[in-house]
Image: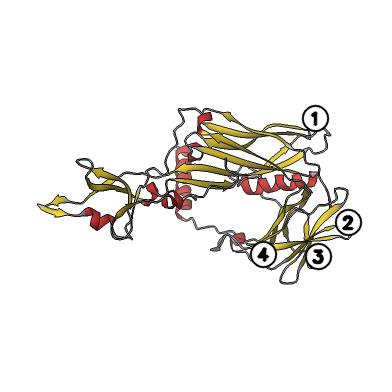
Amino acid sequence: MGRFRNTIVIITILIVGINCKTPYEPSIIASNGNYLVVEGVINTAQDSTVIKLSRTVNLSGKTNSNPELNAIVAVEDNQSSSYPLQEIGNGKYASPSLNLDNTRQYRLRIITSSGKTYLSDLEAVRSNPPIDSVGYLIQSSGMQLYINTHNPNNNTRYYRWDYSETWRFHAEYQSQYITDGTEIVLRTPDQQIYYCFANNNSSTILLGSSAKLQQDVIYQNPITQIPSTSEKIELKYSILVKQYALSTDEYNFWVNLKKNTEQLGSIFDPQPSNINGNVHCTTNPSEIVIGYVGVTSIQQKRIFISSEQLPITWVPAYPYECQQDSNLYCKLVDGKCVNQVQNNLIPVNSSEFITSAIYKPSPLIVGYLGTTQSCADCTIRGATKQPDFWR
């Protein structure tokens, strides 16, 4: 009886607790943190160095981007040489090939429009071997992409990768016709909206280490996974993978950042911690700065994968529910002829996209089939212009 009574008490407490819940809003959500974020690598290879500067934004705010504009940015070495970067917009500062001496150390100097100065620590050039290959494995649920690399000198050990994807896809229905405001006409080649190209950049931190191995070898390190139903692989897919060599401290920075941004979903994941980079504010040493500026050559490799190389049982799923409706020149409604083409398709502001003609009897066109923009216009999710690198 006592145990039953205790159970009733516990249930009562739980019910009261549930009814008395109040929203919890951590102070950090509304904090006034406006910390400088520095992203990028000083590239010693024959390619551009691009540094992105931004400011952190409040979680409770309405914006998710706050670029740092009108700053003065330069790469410096330990022999007092300086290499300025030019502002190219949206908080990005860049320079073409800097032709840097690999025997020197380098850092980044930033002077903001408010007059504050930021410096990264001097860093030695990290040896970055070429990417051996980017490949893929066919799995039951889709395609797993991976990377292979190695350094025969065994002096890299720590790696980071990012990637950009591009794929060719098509709309559910092909819109063969268009209205000119007076009549229905065939689309010209410049008006085609059936085939498009879309792209995406990596959004997770990809790291690898051979520090615990006898040889400096990275074998089939996962890059990304694509479901078998993804539209990315319905026609042709391409991925460009970039590889960065890291120092031990830089690797630890990225590991910590990954834990703080990607692995906080449950009580068993790591707890948030400070992210110590190598960029500091010399004007105010106590100011928090987020970022680690490494120095290395950037290696890259692109591959193409066509649908013919993948299982024929893989069928892409279109992201929208689609159907076509008929629009006739003369549809009898209550015994009267209603011109649906004139009413629904001819106006230039019509929401219907014309897919094909209805012939009855051939070759007489008695109307047209139409559908929504999302089902006939690929440009709402991509662009018809083929990228320069496409083949």
Look at discs 4 and 2 and give the one toward the viewer: 2
Tell me which numbered mark, 4 or 2, is placed earlier along the sequence. 4
In the picture of the structure, the residue carrying the numbered disc 3 is 282
For the residue marked with disc 1, what is the amino acid? Gln
According to the picture, the residue beneath numbered tag 4 turns out to be: 68
Q: Position of residue 107 (x, y in %)?
A: 81, 56
Choose the circle earlier in sequence order: 3 or 2. Answer: 2
The answer, for residue 122, to whether it is visible in the render is no
The residue to which callout 2 is attached is 78
Q: Which residue is mark 1?
A: 215
Q: Is residue 171 left or right of residue 246?
A: left
Q: Residues within 10 Å of mark 4 (few under 14, many from 20)?
A: some
Q: Which element carries disc 4, helix, strand or loop? A: loop
Tag 3–tag 2 contact (CB < 8 Å) = no
Can residue 195 be seen here? The reply is yes
**Residue 200 versus residue 80 in the image, above or below:** above
